[in-house]
Amino acid sequence: MDLFEHQGKEFFARYGMPVSPGEAVFTVDDAVAAAERLGTPVMVKAQVHTGGRGKAGGVKFAADLDAVREHAGNILGLDINGHIVKRLLIEKASDIAEEYYASFTLDRSAKKHLGMLSKEGGVEIETVAEETPDAIAKIWIDPVDGLTEDACRGWVAAANLPDAAVEGAVDILQKLYTAYTEGDADLVEINPLILTPEGKVHVLDAKVTLDGNSEFRHEDYAQYDETQPRDEREEAAHAKGLQYVGLEGSVGVIANGAGLAMSTVDVVNQVGGSPANFLDIGGGANADVMAGALEVINNDPAVKSIFINIFGGITRGEEVANGILEAMKRVEIDSPIVIRLDGTNADEGRAILAPNLNDKLMMEETMLDAARRAVELAS
């Protein structure tokens, strides 16, 4: 789950990283009151889960309270890449001498953590990677060994940060790595990490993506989950405990397992269709879970057909088949359903489904054929 900037800074501050004083607010009056408490000048910053805020006018310097009121009024309600601004961060403004970039994420191919550090901060790192790839110093960290101070110093030296920034950068990068690993994050990013005219290194922005599966280890992460922006479909799926992401197509997708669900979305695209969602019902496919999934998809008016793609593993084919039929008794489905069932006891499952097949419930032998059929029905 993605955190808003102010949440990311709260997360970083727990691990001892220096961040600017600031307050999250939801109204213009609260923005002015926060600026009065913090003392001007301040930055008025849109809080949205997307980049490009500055270019879209979502980040403004305010020298006094009148400017805070003007900027807050302009930014609240602003559409930034399809994200409507509903909250702001009012933050004490900082003097900046230089801007850097720093991040940690997982490099799955290397089976190690990947750190990236660059003197070219304050811009999109993708642009730096494309135009000046040598400006990014990378380090691969074995999770068993961790990030030692010597390795961190070598990494900072490779990035050619100025002498004035070395000690502060080494300190923050080690804390950032600790936040990334102990906080169960998928990504931590600071852009920019700044050097002030007084020679202090400081976190000026924060991007944090936490692994939602780690919530059982972090009771307070529930507060972040509650603030995740979701549309009506995603909210309904979340209430049923389903892993769901809404998309813009017309083929509803249900699969068991995240990998199979992603493959199902891909194969719908491959045969010329457009998936309406990603929905992973997990390892079980009982009637309750299947009914919940069908209900969520059925309530999406854009869905014209439903593709159920199941590969039986521990959950056997006949259990899946019975779950589908029982779910269809509970939910009145508007769109035709195409089923692909394979894996453990698939033959038994198909035998159970066979007498119930009609123009609303169809079955295909392969994933590709089922995808083609579902796309045809959605056309």
Image (tube, helix red, strand yellow):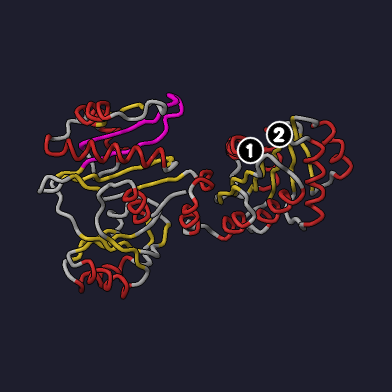
Residue that mark 1 sits on: 257
Q: Amino acid at mark 1?
A: Gly
Residue that mark 2 sits on: 311
Q: Residue at x 38, y 67 (%)?
A: 77
* Camera-side residue of 57 and 33: 33
Instruction: Decide if residue 325 is on the left or right side of residue 68.
Output: right
Instruction: Using the numbered discs, state the Cα–Cα distance from disc 1 to disc 2 in whole angstroms.
Output: 9 Å
> Is there CB contact under 8 Å for labels 1 and 2?
yes
Q: Give the image location of residue 45, x and y in percent.
A: 29, 60
Within 10 Å of disc 1 (Cα), the crowding (few <14, some 14-19, many 20+) is some
SS label for mark 2: strand
- Which quadrant of the figure has residue 275? top right
Q: Residue at x 18, y 37 (%)?
A: 167
Instruction: Decide if residue 117 is on the left or right side of residue 309.
Output: left
Q: Give the image location of residue 268, x and y in percent.
A: 62, 39
Within 10 Å of disc 2 (Cα), the crowding (few <14, some 14-19, many 20+) is many
Q: Residue at x 36, y 29 (%)?
A: 146
Q: Magenta: predominant secondary structure element?
A: strand
Q: Amino acid at mark 2?
A: Phe
Query: Could you say which disc has been placed on residue 370 in the image?
Result: none
Mark found first going from the N terminus, 1 or 2: 1
Residue interval drawn in magenta: 100-119
Q: Give the image location of residue 184, x and y in percent.
A: 45, 41
